[in-house]
Amino acid sequence: MKIKQKAENIFFFLVLMLVLVGISCDSGSSKVRKYKEKNPTVKPVTPTPATPRPTAPTGQQAGAHFQWETPEGWNENRAASGMRLAAFTIKSNNKESICTIIPLRGEAGGLKANVTRWLGQITTTMQLSSHTVETLLKSREKFLTKGQFPAVLIDYTPVTPLPSDKSILVSVITVNGNSIFIKMMGEKSHLMENKKKFKALCQSFTITSTSKPK
């Protein structure tokens, strides 16, 4: 009986050892898993389009064209480029200013936005502030053109510090929902000398039919 019990004990011991060895081998043979982090797919961000610049209307409307009276002594450049309908060179007293006529669609961004933009185009000694913009808007002059189109004239010379500083005279004429910008830029003193002629140019603006009689 003792021999048989010893044999069973030995057998049990061997089985136990085999089990332990098996567990140890299985644990030792297990591989360490490595995870490679994948960068998530990033969709390209479509940039927000910039606010489109105002574009010119078909310009001369069907069966009609714009007309104005060029002031005496103003040299009109008929070969105006880009969106310009016309450009003028004004010379006197050894000074020179430029005046342009540009048609734009709709309100072209609105009067206040354009007044602010034009303020940033002139002398750097001027402070670009909302107060100055409001002053210019409040002092604007309203009138009707020869063609009975509503218009405003904005004079930047009162807020321009020095006579030799750049300044602006600008008129915005509303024609059938579109805008016509007539802008004169030059030294403050030169613009003041030519303000009456500038306003006369703006007031003469009209549309004349080109349709041929049947």
Image (cartoon, rainbow, N blue to C red):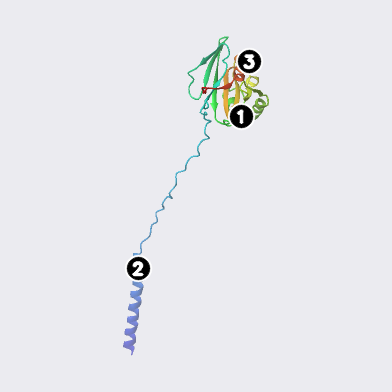
- Relative to 13, is 209 on the left or the right? right
Judging by the rendered image, the residue that carries numbered circle 2 is: 26
* Amino acid on which disc 3 is placed: Lys
- Relative to 155, is 77 on the left or the right? left
Could you say which quadrant of the image residue 190 lies in? top right
Badge 2 element: helix
Badge 1 element: helix
* Amino acid on which disc 2 is placed: Asp
Residue 129 x/y as whole percent? 63, 28
Taking the spot 34% from the left edge, 68% from the top edge, the residue there is 25
Residue 51 x/y as whole percent? 53, 35
Q: Specify which label sits upstream in the sequence, 1 or 2.
A: 2
Asked whether 144 or 137 is in front, the reply is 144
* Amino acid on which disc 1 is placed: Leu
Q: Are marks 1 and 2 in contact (CB under 8 Å)?
A: no
How far apart are the two marked residues, 1 and 3, measured between alpha carbons? 22 Å
